[in-house]
Image (cartoon, grey):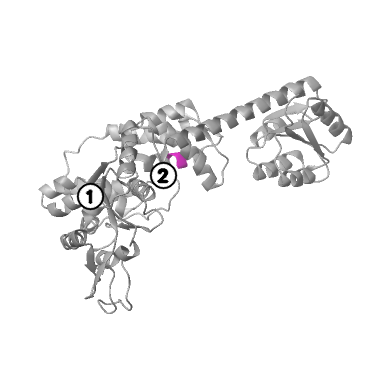
Amino acid sequence: MKTANRILVVDDEPIVCESLSAWLREDGYHVETAGGGREAIEKARCGDYDIYFIDLKMPPGIDGIEAMTEIRKLHPEASVIIITAYATVDTAIAAMKEGAIEYIVKPCNPQEISLLVTRILELKNLRRENVYLRKKLTQQYTFHDITSKSPRMLEIFDLVRSVAAYRSTVLIEGESGTGKELLARAIHQASDRAERPFVAVSCAALVETLLESELFGHERGSFTGAVARQKGKLELADGGDLFLDEIGDISPKLQMDLLRFLEERTFFRVGGAEEIRVDVRVIAATNRDLQRAVQEGRFRDDLYYRLNVIHIRIPPLRERREDVPLLARQFAESIPVELGKPPVTLSEAAVKALVEHDWPGNVRELQNAMERAIVTGRGHVLTGEEFDFMRTRESAAERWTPPTDQTLAEVERRVIEATLRRTGGNIKETASILAIDRSTLYDKIKRYAIERPEHEPSGVGRSG
């Protein structure tokens, strides 16, 4: 006796419903019937079925294709078999195009029906097992929202577990897109500060005066526009963690102010005379070589050593390619949910294309590539063709040769323009890719009269 899988038979002819239902019940299935498309949709609204048998022609009212379309809106993974007495190539193509997994012709053969149902249910069970195993594997290699099975990343997870309980400052270094903030949050979640605030500040997003007020707060009247006292991020993070992203971009004055706080654990609001003491652990991150910045005199050595008590370097994705399939499959499950699309799987060719790519934008680039493929893909399985756009970029990069008939300024202008186009006008990311300060980038855009493209929102082809 087979397990009682649920099947819905939809046909406006009672004799067809009764005969098909009787055959399926003899095989041990739980079968319900509907006399038309509307009734079928209402039943599907109350719960899903393992298989739907739907008649193509059901006048008057909703026909089989319309009923299937509405049911698949309710249950994207619904397995629908279209049945009809009017078999033509056009109707078969239309049914399969709209999502039917099989198309059979009346009068139905009981033995063929039995074999078809068995095959479909075995396939559904296999898919469920694969999803379960993938989730189990992902959980095995997940540490506070970070997924990796790379030995180097597993060492980092062990380090985080051992140091998370202490107040020592942490410096995270890694290329753009490697997940530095995710790791900072993991440190917070793994510590006894997890129930206290985690406050993140991007040091490259604000000019010096605004960043100073953002960090330390200000008193009323301390500058134009300061109409009331405002607490800074340090006060808001009291008892928890303060994450300073892109720490290498802060000015010499702010470097000195931050050093004083790390040494004394006290600070003054801008325009204030009251000394404020807080219990805050500082976690800093950078995609730059701070040690070189110290040697070049662009970053205080005493601040560097204060920040670098616990040092963590996140390896780029190209140095841990074993993580690419793991992450890609994770995105294949999560991104469709966010987009309201049916889940997708990856073919072997797709996985091969992803693993062979160098991922200069790291995990963020992989996520964006997966989103683009999911949005533009036409089926439930992503093939290698869905990722051809990556090979096109690589081929263009390989064909590039340094120009020898242009001035250095002209080359610089062209590089800035190209990078701005690539990032959709994202100044922060463009500056990161070019390894220059945001203020420097703004100066060069103004100097070369570069027209900045409009910054695209998160979506297809984004890189931020």
The disc at residue 178 is: none
Residue 369 magenta-highlighted: yes
The residue lying at 29 percent from left, 55 percent from top is 281
Where does the image place residue 449, in percent across and percent down from the top left? Answer: 24, 57
Q: Secondary structure at mark 1?
A: helix
Q: In which quadrant of the rendered view does residue 9 lie?
A: top right
Where does the image place residue 22, in percent across and percent down from the top left? Answer: 84, 29
Type of amino acid under label 2: His
Type of amino acid under label 1: Arg
Magenta region, main secondary structure: helix
Q: Which residues are magenta?
A: 368-372
> Would you call the spot at circle 1 few (<14 residues within 10 Å), some (14-19), or many (20 or more)?
some
The disc at residue 413 is: 1
Q: In which quadrant of the rendered view does residue 79 lie?
A: top right
Residue 92 magenta-highlighted: no
Q: Which residue is mark 2?
A: 144
> Would you call the spot at circle 2 few (<14 residues within 10 Å), some (14-19), or many (20 or more)?
some
Q: Residue furthest top?
A: 111
Precedes in sequence: disc 1 or disc 2: 2
